[in-house]
Image (cartoon, rainbow, N blue to C red):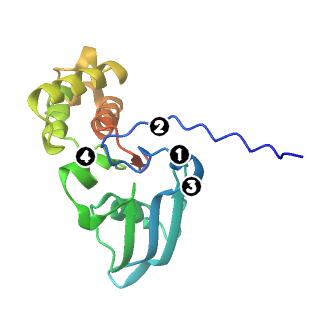
Amino acid sequence: AQSALPRPWRCHLTSSTPDALWASRSVRVLRPAAVLASGITRSVRGVRLLDDLELSVGVGGRLLLVSRPEGSASLLLRILAGLAHADRGNVRLAGVSRAGDSAAGWARRIGYVGASAGIYAWMTPAEVLELAGRLAGYHRAERHRRSDAAVERYRLGASRDAPIRRGGAALAQRTALAAAMLTDPEVLLLDDP
């Protein structure tokens, strides 16, 4: 008797870089971790907020962090995004360690939206997206193509050239999300957006 092989798991993921974690067909079989943190320890003002934290989130996975003490989940997200450092431990996102920091490496693989949008109220969504494209290292034509697509996807057209203060917090958050998604990141970190 011949045993039937299980059908392969279907995976329809995009990637922002050719060497992306899930650019390979092997992801269907191996199901690697998109987020891998080991031994993360961090103290703030003498209070240990993260103590030898171990975390593994597979490709395509979602994770909701609820923390005690308050603020430690936000701190972990900032560490994962590369905006804060750990006292000890290692982080790998989308198969790359923080040591691989470059526009083509870490910056294009990670999208982060903090608890506040982190955008100056006098900026327009068009200016924010232009800045995000420049920081990611895209050439002018690619920045415009990606910005136009983000304006369409996140319904920013009516407010594209108006200061964000006119649209309030909702416009600021949509603009921050559009900027974070501009690079088609492999890992998206959202902190109470």
| Residue ID for mark 3 | 30
Q: Residue 37 appears in which quarter of the rendering?
A: bottom left
Q: Kindly indicate whether the residue at mark 2 contacts the one at mark 1 (C-beta within 8 angstroms).
A: yes
- Crowding around mark 1 (Cα neighbors within 10 Å: few <14, some 14 to 19, many 20+) is some
- Crowding around mark 3 (Cα neighbors within 10 Å: few <14, some 14 to 19, many 20+) is few
| Among the two numbered marks 4 and 3 on one chain, the one whose residue lies closer to the N terminus | 3
| Residue ID for mark 2 | 13
| Residue ID for mark 4 | 118
Q: Is residue 156 above or below residue 139?
A: above
**Number of numbered markers:** 4
| Among the two numbered marks 1 and 2 on one chain, the one whose residue lies closer to the N terminus | 2
Identified by mark 4, the residue type is Gly
Q: Is residue 66 left or right of residue 93?
A: right
| Among the two numbered marks 4 and 1 on one chain, the one whose residue lies closer to the N terminus | 1
Disc 3 or disc 2, which is closer to the eye? 3
Residue in the picture at 53% in, 69% down: 68
The residue most toward the right is: 1
